[in-house]
Image (cartoon, helix red, strand yellow):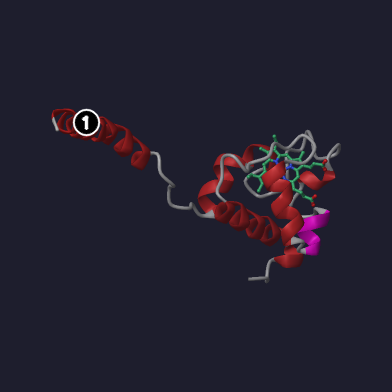
Amino acid sequence: MRAGRRRGRLQSLGALALLPLLSLLAACGPKADRTAEQLYPEYCARCHGADGRGDPRNVNLYPNEDLTRSRLTGQGAHLLIYRRIAEGYGPMPGFAHRLSAVEIGRLADYSMKLNPANAERK
Ligand code: HEC
């Protein structure tokens, strides 16, 4: 009987000790998905330029860095563009560990719209 009571007290102490951990986890929880307009300047513009035309120093070597004319944005190949953003492509790093799936999807749409061939696409 006594031992049972002690175990009960220990268990509630254990639960108390978990509380700060739980609130920490809640604070690190999933953040709201950001829009492409918020993400692009922060993650993409340093290489692709604010207007998507790429860095003039690199675009000769990597013509697909110019998203206004690149092959995939011209084709409107959403799935392939999604994969390149998520997994990386040549010198471009992958973003799967930094951005949510919804955010990568929005950036794929945004990349396609930078190409006049797809500007009308919704
Ligand atoms: C470190 C520089 C760098 C950053 C940062 C970067 N990219 Fe890239 N990206 C490139 C380069 C260079 C290429 C072309 C690679 C090649 O052709 O081998 C490319 C290719 C692409 C392509 C493929 C275009 C095609 O037709 O093949 C897309 C789409 C793209 N980037 C979108 C993005 C988005 C969206 C972001 C931000 C989340 C981003 N990139 C961040 C350098 C970068």
Q: Residue at x 76, y 63 (%)?
A: 76
**Which one is nearer the viewer's eye here, 63 or 36?**
36
Q: Residue at x 62, y 43 (%)?
A: 96
Residue 42, given in percent of the width and then of the height, sits at 55, 40
Q: The N terminus is located in which quarter? A: top left
**Which one is nearer the viewer's eye here, 22 or 10?**
10
Identify the main secondary structure in magenta: helix
Q: Residue at x 48, y 53 (%)?
A: 33
Q: Is residue 46 left or right of residue 31?
A: right
Q: Quadrant of ligand 1?
A: top right
Q: SS class of the residue under badge 1?
A: helix
**Which one is nearer the viewer's eye here, 95 or 22?**
22
Residue 88, given in percent of the width and then of the height, sits at 73, 41
Q: Is residue 115 above or below residue 121?
A: above
Residue 121, given in percent of the width and then of the height, sits at 67, 70
Residue 4, given in percent of the width and then of the height, sits at 19, 33
Residue count near mark 1 (Cα–Cα under 10 Å), binned few <14, some 14–19, many ≥20: few
| Range shown magenta | 71-75
Q: Is residue 47 above or below residue 79?
A: above
Residue type beneath disc 1: Arg
Q: Is residue 73 left or right of residue 46?
A: right
Q: Is residue 106 above or below residue 30?
A: below
Q: Is residue 78 magenta?
A: no
Q: Is residue 73 magenta?
A: yes
Name the residue that disc number 1 marks: 7
Q: The C terminus is located in which quarter? A: bottom right
Q: Within 8 Å of ligand 1, the CB of disc 1?
A: no
Quarter where residue 7 is shown: top left
Q: How many marks?
A: 1
Q: Is residue 36 left or right of residue 57?
A: left
